[in-house]
Amino acid sequence: MNDKNTAKIIIVTGGAGFIGSAVIRELINQTEHSVINVDKLTYAGNLESLKTIDQNSRYTFEQVDICDALNIKRVLASYQPDIIMHLAAESHVDRSIYGPSEFIQTNIVGTYTLLEQARVYWNTLEGDKKANFRFHHISTDEVYGDLPHPDELSGHCEEQSDEAIHDAALPLFTEVTAYAPSSPYSASKAGSDHLVRAWQRTYGLPTLVTNCSNNYGPFHFPEKLIPLVILNALEGKPLPIYGKGNQIRDWLYVEDHARALIKVATEGRISQTYNIGGHNEKQNIEVVDVICEILSELAAIKNLKFKIKHYKDLKVFVKDRPGHDTRYAIDASKIQRELGWTPLETFESGIRKTVQWYLDNQAWCQHVQDGSYQRERLGETK
Ligand SMILES: NC(=O)c1ccc[n+]([C@@H]2O[C@H](COP(=O)([O-])OP(=O)(O)OC[C@H]3O[C@@H](n4cnc5c(N)ncnc54)[C@H](O)[C@@H]3O)[C@@H](O)[C@H]2O)c1
């Protein structure tokens, strides 16, 4: 029997990244499980995000590339995990447009390598250890492509209110939505999801897949929209808005995602997919405006090269991302119904905590940007 309360040995790949580090902090602080963090430490991985737990005796770090079959085999054989939570990936859409090769390598070849080594390891297990083993693959809602945008529909339904149009006509991604990825990033994640399901169907490897909406919160690398806007605003740099800024994302606070992932990994039904989302559909431009409002309250404008009255004056509209998806929105009713998970943060509470965290942790922001990335734009095609 799979007892969710028994202390387990959990391998987390990509544990030095944004979501992986939140999962590890939650596992160490809120459970009795032991964690082995398997991470290559690319530009996106930072062990400083784990400083609060890295002295805990239940935490171990292994600097390993998931494409390195021999080292993955060694790690599995020596730690004998009960669960693998697979988050390691190249994750930034703009980078995938600029240079797709790393995305194919890590997201597809890396996932294949991990699956094969997990299968070999799982076949060495016996009894309850074998019966209870789980491989949890963490993926994105971007594999589904995009959904109709309210702006496309409002022209056809002039007499109805915005809410009525939204409720009546706008679908959500469910676990059975067909895959239609738009970017090299989402296509590589879609490829990895298919591999995981194939390893379950063909070899019986006990797998689970989760597809989640956009995350935000502490320890987010400053190339992504929310941290980029906060840090640029504080330095009086332009706040770039792609196209009209009307793209809709369904935002989820990263710690809510981490709690959902641990629930799925320990209690989810084998072979199932669970969609995870925050019920927080916001246009990108609304997100930028909210951040500017909160910053105006928490951080007075000072010492900037250009005189501005409000952080919003820094907004600049730039050429849209090629193939930019217009709307993502998740139906998270399955995980709520089956596993009792719901997010604890609203967008309003989560974004306030996030802005405050960036104000309080400027040193972390400096350190993670000491390498090559300096918040320049990536991913424009000619
Ligand atoms: N960020 C989001 O909004 C979001 C939403 C849904 C799903 N996801 C998925 O969640 C996972 C984690 O996303 P994130 O935002 O934390 O990513 P991230 O880019 O912050 O972190 C990725 C981590 O993986 C590591 N890594 C990269 N290549 C590796 C390799 N070859 N071997 C070992 N480690 C490697 C990096 O060093 C880094 O620590 C990804 O699979 C992503 O597709 C992310």
Image: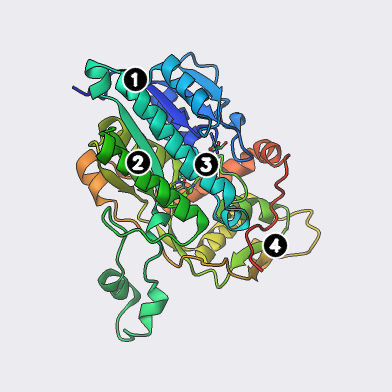
Residue at the location (37% across, 67% down)?
Answer: 147
Indicate the secondary structure of the residue bearing disc 1: loop
Residue 116, horizontal then vertical, whole percent: 39, 32
Q: Are marks 2 and 3 in contact (CB under 8 Å)?
A: no
Helix or strand or loop: what does disc 4 sit on? loop
The earlier-in-sequence mark between 3 and 1 is 1
Query: Residue shown at 27%/69% (left/top)?
Result: 167
Relative to 151, is 275 above or below? Answer: above
Q: Which residue is mark 2?
A: 196
The numbered mark, 2 or 1, whose residue comes first in the sequence reads 1
**The residue carrying mark 4 has its beta carbon less than 8 Å from ligand 1:** no
The residue mark sitting in front, 2 or 4, is 2
Mark 4 — residue? 238
Pointer 2 or 3: first along the chain = 3
Query: Element type at marker 2?
Result: helix
Which residue position holds label 3?
106
Tell me the quadrant of the picture where the C terminus can be found.
Answer: bottom right
Q: Which mark is residue 8?
A: 1
Please state which of the two labelled residues, at mark 3 or mark 4, is closer to the viewer.
3
Say which residue appears at 59% left-offset and 57% top-offset. 94
